[in-house]
């Protein structure tokens, strides 16, 4: 690991964890949008994407790293925010749906905007926290992760992520590794089509190894389905049929944000093919890295993605910074890069040269990349 950022002694109390608790500010902002409607609705995305992206762009805060050997017992205040988020998010979503059904001060299109704001909360915060929780050994944490993913109607993400993505990242077998020259809009539709079946196949294979049929109750899909049906029922009770529509819309907004981040994290990166369908082990060089401190507070260090793939069970406060000699670096934070990804020409102009530079840096021995066409979508450079 690079010595550019040396891990500091484990100062892991409330004061050091407090910046990661900034996510709680979204709750009153969402309620302000629901109560006032109108232009206030825009405060939700502005207070997340725009605010943290601007802080990173203009203040350039120094990243902080913590000793990776810090025991869990010293991380109580860091872990606490991820543990309380599921009930906080659930109360906010269903409370807002109930409030909108009980009042008539907002138009239908404003309510769709409010639902989008709920999706910003459940996608930017909820799914990121679910990602942290599903990687942990504790049953309680994994259960909370399932609850958060079910609020986005995307429960199968756990199976896809743990059983497929981490095993096959940066290979043709990984659905959510964005291919070189593949634009986000095509990527999003492809992942929606392939992700569910990929997760189902992974669970079926896992059960088959134990001699169990796919319909066995050990199949995690029964948990995903029951939780999602339960939340749809809560949405119906809270806001009627329109409440279900709004709940589904916030879920779509959350999924859209998740896949935007997935698109950015591995775009164009491939593991070296060793022959006979085998690939080199996953390394830090197979994820785009970013260490913009403000956005890492919001996303609990998700941008240190290279270290996450190196040590998937490592808790978010302990993820280490990776320098340019170990991992490719994004020029801006996720907030900026995901916005850029919405504009394919702009994205290719900024990222394709970086992919080609990555190839020269990490794989100078590979002269002909045509053998990796399965990871590419031919389009103009």
Image: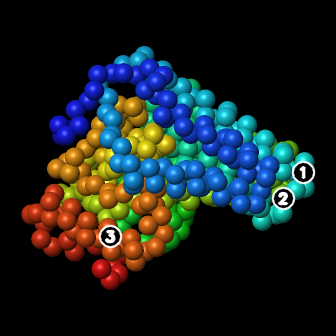
Q: Is residue 106 toward the left or the right of residue 311 in the image?
A: right
Name the residue that disc number 1 marks: 103
Q: Dot 3: within a 10 Å radius of its alpha carbon, few (fewer than 14), some, or many (20 or more) residues?
A: some
| Callout 1: SS | loop
Q: Using the rendered view, name the quadrant where residue 217 is placed.
A: top right
| Callout 2: SS | loop
| Callout 3: SS | helix
Colour scheme of the rendered structure: rainbow
Query: 89 or 214: which is nearer to us?
Result: 89
Res 371 visible: no
Q: Dot 1: within a 10 Å radius of its alpha carbon, few (fewer than 14), some, or many (20 or more) residues?
A: few
Q: Is residue 279 above or below residue 238?
A: below
Image quarter in which the C terminus is found: bottom left
Q: Is residue 309 toward the left or the right of residue 298 in the image?
A: left
Name the residue that disc number 3 marks: 350
Q: Please, which residue is most extreme toward the left here?
A: 365
Query: 93 or 40: which is nearer to us?
Result: 40
* Residue 98 coordinates in the image, percent (x, y): 84, 45
Name the residue that disc number 2 marks: 106
Residue at 23% across, 37% down: 5
Do the numbered discs 1 and 2 sit on residues whose CB atoms are within 8 Å? yes
Q: In whole angstroms, how far apart are the C-alphas of marks 3 and 1?
A: 47 Å
Residue at 39% across, 55% down: 57
Q: Please, which residue is most extreme toward the front here?
A: 59
């Amino acid at each position: 690991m690079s010595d550019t950022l040396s891990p500091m002694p484990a100062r892991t109390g409330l004061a050091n964890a407090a910046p990661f608790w900034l996510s709680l500010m979204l709750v009153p902002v969402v309620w302000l949008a629901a109560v006032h409607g109108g232009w206030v609705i825009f405060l939700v995305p502005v207070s997340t994407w725009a605010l943290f992206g601007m802080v990173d762009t203009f203040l350039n805060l120094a990243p902080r790293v913590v000793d990776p050997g810090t025991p869990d017992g010293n991380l109580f205040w860091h872990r606490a925010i991820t543990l309380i988020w599921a009930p906080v998010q659930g109360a906010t979503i269903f409370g807002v749906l109930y409030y909108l059904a009980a009042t008539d001060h907002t138009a239908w299109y404003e309510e769709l905007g409010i639902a989008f704001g709920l999706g910003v909360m459940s996608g930017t915060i909820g799914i990121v926290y679910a990602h942290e929780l599903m990687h942990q050994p504790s049953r309680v944490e994994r259960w909370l992760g399932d609850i958060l993913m079910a609020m986005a109607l995307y429960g199968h993400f756990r199976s896809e992520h743990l059983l497929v993505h981490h095993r096959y990242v940066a290979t043709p077998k990984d659905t959510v590794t964005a291919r070189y020259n593949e634009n986000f809009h095509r990527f999003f539709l492809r992942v929606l089509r392939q992700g569910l079946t990929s997760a189902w196949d992974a669970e079926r294979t896992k059960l088959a190894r134990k001699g169990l049929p796919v319909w066995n109750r050990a199949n995690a899909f029964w948990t995903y389905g029951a939780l999602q049906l339960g939340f749809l029922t809560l949405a119906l009770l809270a806001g009627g049929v329109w409440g279900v529509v709004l709940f589904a819309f916030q879920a779509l907004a959350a999924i859209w944000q998740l896949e935007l981040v997935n698109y950015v994290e591995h775009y164009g990166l491939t593991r070296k093919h060793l022959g006979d369908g085998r690939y080199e082990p996953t390394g830090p060089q197979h994820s785009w890295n970013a260490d913009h401190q403000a956005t890492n507070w919001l996303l609990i260090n998700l941008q240190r993605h290279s270290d996450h793939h190196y040590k998937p069970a490592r808790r978010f406060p302990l993820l280490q910074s990776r320098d340019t000699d170990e991992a490719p670096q994004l020029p801006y934070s996720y907030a900026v890069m995901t916005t850029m990804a919405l504009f394919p020409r702009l994205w290719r102009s900024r990222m394709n040269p970086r992919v080609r530079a990555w190839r020269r840096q990490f794989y100078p021995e590979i002269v002909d990349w045509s053998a990796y066409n399965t990871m590419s979508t031919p389009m103009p450079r």
